[in-house]
Image (cartoon, rainbow, N blue to C red):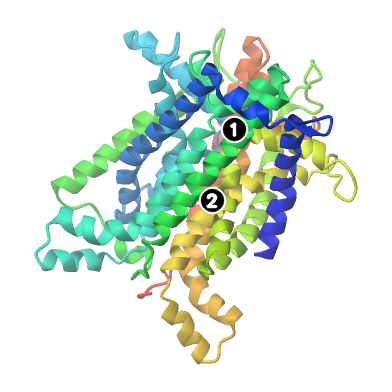
Amino acid sequence: MVVPVAFFALFFAWPVASIVERGLRVDGVWQFGRFGETLSRPEILDVLWFTLWQALASTGLTLLIALPGAYVFARFDFRGKGLLRAVVTVPFVMPTVMVGTAFLALVGRGGLLDELWGVRLDTTVWAILIAHVFFNYAVVVRTVGGLWAQLDPRQEEAARVLGASRWKAWRTVTLPALAPSVAAAALMVFLFTASSFAVVQILGGSTYSTLETEIYRQTVVRFDLTTAAVLTMVQFVAVGVVLAVHARTVRRRETALRMVAPEEAVRRPRGIGQWALFAGVLLSVALLIVLPLGVLVERSFATSHGYGLDYYRALQTPDPSGTFLVPLLDTIGNSPRYAVVATLIALVIGGLAAAALTRRAGRLVRGFDALLMLPLGVSAVTVGFGFLITLDEPPFDLRASWILVPLAQALVGVPFVVRTMLPVLRAVDERLREAAAVLGASPWRAWREVDLPLVRRALLIAAGFAFAVSLGEFGATVFIARPDSPTLPVAVARLLGRPGELNYGQAMALSTILMVVCAVSLLLLERLRTDRTSGEF
């Protein structure tokens, strides 16, 4: 636990605490009275209520739509499965700015639905909820599906032989085994949607606001650090409560599971019911994920004089405004390089943390578990500003160093590594480790020969998540990325903030390139992560 605790203390707790101190401590005096004053304002109460209920609604809708997809990917074998898995993960890597823009082009004024049927959903809560499902679909599919693919299907078949219906067998055998994984996915989706920023800002307009957008408004627009600090503390406490409830609930449901190699559990769909489910999942992916992505690609080629490569060619020329010190095409290499480093950091920190949490060492470890998830629910604006004001003096003067960006990205990647690996690690029968120890294996050898073969697939899934998160991280990176080496999401956001058809088209072109980079990376990972181990675990 030492390395993860030190990492979070230095690169999360310290920056956030510094921002809060600057906002609540004036002339050496703490302004705790501002809590009651701020939280009693009607507009702030409206923000708090909307943040809560839209996050709950988004989480429920995402689980409802994505769980059938998780089953299809875990249990069915079909042509193009790796490609489709990469496609559903692409939205998660996209900057949230582009998610909002894609849906604005789809459901807003002059969008596809407006042109075809005269339907507009912008400035409605439905646009926000659907965009959140689009963004978080992969979280459920990969987190729940990763464990589901390794559950022994013969346990459910045994219940059927004993007289249980298909529904009862799934409800009494499979669902309890999946509960920790489903809860972990729901937790991540809730935290992401509760701290939603760009999606709400673009699709909600001035009608809707979450805690994240309000913190940004108070910090950047109104320069009211006191109100921003109060809202940050409210967000921090709320996330802590959610994590505590989650840890206590999931802990009671954890059991050792009978697992098999993923290849043993997959098969072609059989029967009209399974084929109907398979077709329904394909249709939902086509409408919910492929269609918005297609709109982005189409806009990247659509110029004022027809379709062409004008926007892509413009990426090779120097920026006349001086916002970017290098041609925008050079940013294509920055994001993958940063993402690789961030992924390695996240795997080391998250792997150590997951191993520590597997030991079940009481309240201290449960508190540590909650700490690891906090970066998903605390304002990225706060973290980004905190990096600027804390990591500016020796021995931690990192403002001019390239490593600052991967460090910020790894903060968001670590929770995904932990949440993906932990259900599998905790499902390993402790008697296997004890048997290895009795036979003379050291703790390291026991982990290498017992845990690692079982967790290898989850580790590669976690690596894919961390890489995807790092590629698309925007909230904190936008404050610390250097002008001579911006990431793709930062470049896209800055282009969208500038008027003109060329800037918008270049943003669409960069977003398309980002999608291709993500898809190729995930396809390569799909090939690497295939577990060829046969036999029963």
At horizontal 74% and vertical 46% (from top left) the residue drawn is: 14
Tell which residue pokes out farthest to the bottom in this image. Answer: 439
- Amino acid on which the number 1 mark rests in the picture: Ile
Say what secondary structure mark 1 lies in: helix
Q: Nearer the viewer, residue 17 or 6?
A: 17
How would you rate the neighbour count of disc 1 (Cα within 10 Å): few for under 14, some for 14-19, many for 20 or more?
A: some
How would you rate the neighbour count of disc 2 (Cα within 10 Å): few for under 14, some for 14-19, many for 20 or more?
A: many
List the residue tagged with mark 2: 416
Viewer can see residue 299: no
Residue 229 drawn at (x, y percent): 67, 31
- Amino acid on which the number 2 mark rests in the picture: Phe
Q: Quadrant of residue 264?
A: bottom left
- When the figure is inspected, residue 247 is found, relative to residue 228, above or below; the finding is below
- When the figure is inspected, residue 407 is found, relative to residue 198, above or below; the finding is below
Q: Nearer the viewer, residue 237 or 192?
A: 237
Query: Which mark is first along the chain, 2 or 1?
Result: 2
Residue 185 drawn at (x, y percent): 43, 47
CB contact under 8 Å: marks 1 and 2: no
At horizontal 48% and vertical 14% (from top left) the residue drawn is: 207
At horizontal 81% and vertical 41% (from top left) the residue drawn is: 390
Q: Distance between the residues labelled 1 and 2?
A: 24 Å
Name the disc covering residue 146, or none: none
List the residue tagged with mark 1: 513
Side of 212 relative to 148 (left or right): right
Side of 163 relative to 324 (left or right): left
Viewer can see residue 303: yes
Give the position of the C terminus as an image quadrant: bottom left
Residue 19 drawn at (x, y percent): 74, 35
